[in-house]
Amino acid sequence: MKTGFSVLWLVSLRQERVIRGRHWLLMLLQRIFALTLMVAPSVGAPPQVISFPTSPTVPATGRFPPRTELQFLLTLPLRNRVALQQLIADQGNPSSKHYHQYLTPEEFSLRFGPTTEDYDAVAAFATAHQLRIVQRHPNRTVLDVCGSVENIEHAFQSDLRLYRNEDRNITYFSPDRPPKPAQPVPLLEVIGLDNFSTPRPAGMLLSLALKSKARPQALGSDSTGLYIGKDFRSAYMPGSVLTGLGESIALVEFDSYYTNDISSYLNRANLTGVPLTNIYLNGVSGVPGMYNSEVSLNICLAQCMAPALTKILVYQGTNPITILNKIATDNAARQICCSWLWTQTNGTASLDQILSQFAAQGQSFFCASGDTGAYTAGIPSPTDSPLATSVGGTSLTVLSAGGIWFSEQVWSWQPNYFVGSGGGVSSNYTIPSWQSGINSSANGGSTKNRNIPDVTMVAENIFGFANNGTPYGIVGTSAAAPLWAGVCALANQQSISGGKGPVGLLNPALYAIGKGTNYILAFHDITSGNNTNQTSGTNRYFATIGYDLCSGWGSPNGMGLINLLSPPVAPVVTSSSNSVVGFTGQSVKLTFTAIGTPLLSYQWRFNGIPIAGATSTELILNNLGLQSAGIYSVSVTNSYGTTTSVVANLQIIEGVDTPLWSPWHLALSGSGLFVLAWRTLSNGRVRGQTG
């Protein structure tokens, strides 16, 4: 990708602001109606379909070719929505019995998913109108279908027309009126019948020759001076022994990547690499396109912060609802990252349903806040959702190349460049309970509506590869979001290792920490800089002490944040071998399991005496003798305590090569007392009896 792309990208951002300004009222009305659906109790009548044409006042330039095939989505409303919202609130409330008690996808579908009868009715409706079923979803909220334009028009009593938008210099298709099913069916939304707004990356590329535009000068360990690899852990998690072991991260992507870019980065950063799993949706084939840099950036930075992840799942498709719903029903990752934004023309209620399932299942969702600075005419989806942790961007300074954190300020290249950390007040969502109570007199935020971002992290002077081996400097909140997903993987590793559940939706906990006395222990408070731009005026928004609409609560302050999200615990032995019988001359393996905050160290003991070199979770004793009989215990230690537990009481039977009873069966009949004895094959001595 050449430098010229950055200029085009900046121009498109300016145009997008103009477009959002013209259509903000339509989007606001749509969101208000969507929220009404989310909180209303289930009723017998199906909800109204809320799929708005993108530009209803713009004259059509023609008809969309009637035989063109389109793939789109039909979505169904959840049941028991009020109970679902209460459950999510309770899961984030430490005083509730449901705190961090999460559902499986099967439990979620059983309690809140549409009924099988309703799902089948929607499928039957589609089939009756000659629409093909492309994919069914286990939670029964989404149905992927495909059909010709003329069949779609007949099914939804709406004509697909072509429209012209001069601001963006594009021709797009859209319904000429809101789609309405020809027969009553329990639909929530029809998604994908227009292509006015498609997901776009929040980040951007710069040629290395332009890195001097970054401010302040980077102190990364790469030869270019940019941040790479272990620099991020050194700055934000110095000395942490957590690596994301046992955790996975799911990435929401609308392009693919070159494997050469990943391997080149790992080699240059001296990282081992994490296994990647590609999930292709909506008919995509995995061929990298013009935004391949976004995908490779997310893959690389996620594992920079959590280098021992079990895997990174790269979900690639064209429709956000399909991708997000697949991540929810797979439930294969406890942290999810999205660095793409889109103007939500429809699909809002369906999006909120999926993010609710994330929360109910204990999945943490991170989204870049955007790169255009202060929002004044609407915030793109999905970063303003209360069910997403919105991540802003900073300029980071470290003490030395690849060293520890020294200072940060809000990332902004205003006024020379139209880029900076996204932040502002949502027109789509009212303020959630956990965000209320913040003094907004200094930060310019709202006391009635949702404010973003929630947190922040470095967003410039970052090294990366794109376009099959070309090195670039990277800027944008697209970098900060996967780094925060990596931080969450560390918190979940500590939580799961301590015998607890996932940390789940982070926002309630983050705001409780921010409002509490441990704030400075958890966050680097960003108090310098702003994200003002050409459309915001000079009063929006500035970094302040505490929460602000440039950097949220700030960036992670090492293990101080992790320990508050997942309090450390001393070790506990949870299972062991118990009583074990061995035979002279043979071998036996003793094992145990323990939980506790990493890192755990182990020391085996025999009759209370430490066994030299026995420091793993299993102990293999070879060539057993009578002297091997006794009590075997283990001491488990971490930074928060030591516990010693008996693992096995080992008994030894002498001289048995092969147990006599293994090939024999003995049947007895009659009454009275029977005395049974067995002899060894080697010397005939009786070693045991029963009766």
Image (spheres, rainbow, N blue to C red):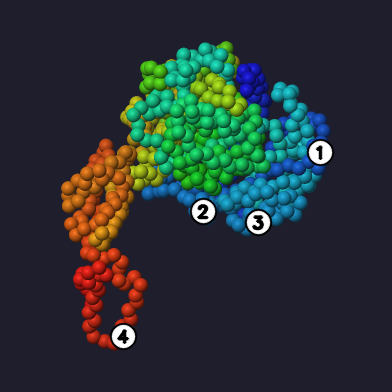
Query: Percent x, y for residue 386?
Result: 50, 36
Q: In this figure, which residue is indicated by the disc labeled 3?
A: 120
Query: Percent x, y for residue 199?
Result: 62, 32
Query: Can you tell which mark lies on residue 362?
Result: none
Q: Nearer the viewer, mark 4 or mark 3?
A: 4
Q: Is residue 543 visible?
A: no
Give the alpha-carbon distance from disc 4 to disc 3, as whole Å.
Answer: 62 Å
Residue for point 81% across, 36% down: 63
Tell me which numbered mark, 2 or 1, is placed earlier along the sequence.
1
Q: In this figure, which residue is indicated by the disc labeled 1?
A: 65
Tell me which numbered mark, 4 or 2, is placed earlier along the sequence.
2
Tell me which numbered mark, 2 or 3, is placed earlier along the sequence.
2
Query: Percent x, y for residue 644?
Result: 22, 48
Tell me which numbered mark, 3 or 1, is placed earlier along the sequence.
1
Give the alpha-carbon distance from disc 1 to disc 4, as whole Å.
Answer: 88 Å
Crowding at dot 2, Cα within 10 Å, few <14 / some 14-19 / many 20+, comes out as few
Residue for point 34% across, 44% down: 498
Answer yes or no: do the residues labelled 2 and 3 have beta carbons within 8 Å? Answer: no
Query: Can you tell which mark lies on residue 669?
Result: 4
Q: In this figure, which residue is indicated by the disc labeled 2?
A: 106
Quadrant the C terminus occupies: bottom left
Answer yes or no: do the residues labelled 4 and 3 have beta carbons within 8 Å? Answer: no
Q: Secondary structure at mark 1?
A: loop
